[in-house]
Amino acid sequence: VRAAVFASGTGSNFQAIMETESLACEVALLVCDKPQAIVLERAKTYNVPTFICDPKQFASKAEYEQVIVERLQEAEISWIFLAGYMRIAGPTLLQAYEGKIVNIHPSLLPEFPGIDAIGQAFKAGAKRTGVTVHFIDEGIDTGPIIAQETVTIQEKDTETSLKEKIQKVEHELYPRVINQLLQSK
Ligand code: GRF
């Protein structure tokens, strides 16, 4: 199975996926919308080919996504794992990879969707938050939930310590869910 990871930023989840022993797929492409993203350096260390596609170079989301879809098809990609990809997928991408695009989000969805979910939960004074892996649809962090894991927020937690706890859970949960998904297909 050939998979693509989409990322826009640091890529710690990308790294966790790459460091997984007996991953049930080959990460054959990293798609990145930010030419300066740190994740691109990580891809280099793992010898994963990168496709940098800057949406600013296109007149519409449809045209931007069409170019990506062509590159994915060329690379015979069958699954897409979003890992900090900071864009909402449009119909072009969704239709080409229906039921094959998975995202990870740092909250217990449907709570705290969107940007800075960890900060949102912390500032709301929540007693617990967590991590969700879900199929995407055209909404912001909506779509069928595949797996969730709870993280408790303690009195002594700061936003930084909470972020660390959540990332630790993400890095373990995402590769495990990817393997479960691929093995059940
Ligand atoms: C993660 O918290 C992920 O859940 C969210 O974006 C963040 C990406 O972090 N969608 P990284 O780039 O993988 O370090």
Image: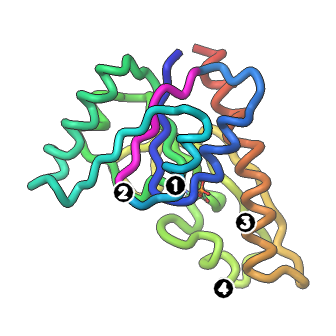
Say above or below: 151 vs 67: below
What residue is disc 3 on?
Answer: 129
Nearest the viewer among 124 and 97 is 97
Measured in 3D between alpha carbons, the distance from the residue under mark 3 to the one under mark 1, in whole angstroms, is 18 Å
Say above or below: 160 vs 40: below
What residue is disc 2 on?
Answer: 35
Q: x%, y% of residue 45?
A: 61, 40
* First reached walking from the N terminus: tag 3 or tag 2: 2
Which mark lies nearer to you, 1 or 4? 1
Give the number of the disc on residue 123.
4
**Which structural element holds mark 3?**
strand
Looking at the rendered image, the quarter that the C terminus falls into is: top right
Mark 2, residues whose alpha carbon is within 10 Å: few (<14), some, or many (≥20)? some
Q: Quadrant of residue 68?
A: top left
Q: Residue at x 78, y 69 (%)?
A: 128
* First reached walking from the N terminus: tag 3 or tag 1: 1
* First reached walking from the N terminus: tag 1 or tag 4: 1
Residue 29, magenta (yes or no): yes
What residue is disc 1 on?
Answer: 84
The amino acid type, in three-letter code, at marker 3 is Thr
